[in-house]
Amino acid sequence: MRFLLLFSRQGKLRLQKWFTPIPEREKKKITRDMTSMVLARKPRSCNFLHWKDLKIVYKR
């Protein structure tokens, strides 16, 4: 596990926990990408995403 992000359906970041050292700029980019990807998916979609070399698991 590299990071844990918790955000609202409006896209507001509520909690972030990073388990590997990542530069602040990268963190902001990852957060922005994750929120846009997850929120754009349909409610009945699978809860697994492939992004870059990572497997993303999310829950609505």
Image (cartoon, grey):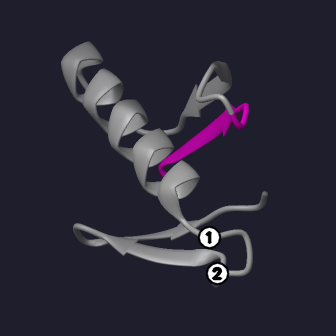
Magenta segment = 1-9
Residue at the spot 43% in from the left edge and 55% down from the top edge: 37
Please, what is the three-letter code of the amino acid marked with disc 2? Ser
Discs 1, 2 touching: Cβ within 8 Å: yes
3 part of magenta stretch:
yes
Q: How many residues crowd around disc 1 within 10 Å: few (fewer than 14), some, or many (20 or more)?
A: few
- Residue 1 visible at all: no
Q: Quadrant of residue 45?
A: bottom right
In the image, is residue 36 part of the stretch drawn in magenta? no
Quarter holding the N terminus is bottom right
Amino acid type assigned to the residue bearing label 1 in the image: Lys
Q: Which residue is mark 2?
A: 45
| Residue 5 against residue 51 in the figure, above or below | above
- The relative height of residue 28 versus residue 49 in the rendered view (above or below) is above
Dividing the picture into quadrants, the one containing residue 55 is bottom left
* Residue 35 seen in the figure: yes
Residue 44, image x and y in percent? 73, 80
Q: Compute the Cα span from label 1 to label 2.
A: 5 Å
* Residue at horizontal 49 percent and vertical 56 percent from the top: 40
Q: On screen, 45 above or below 51?
A: below
Label 2: few (<14), some or many (≥20) within 10 Å?
Answer: few
Where does label 1 land, which residue? 42
Q: Residue 60: x, y in percent?
A: 78, 57
Q: Is residue 17 left or right of residue 49?
A: right
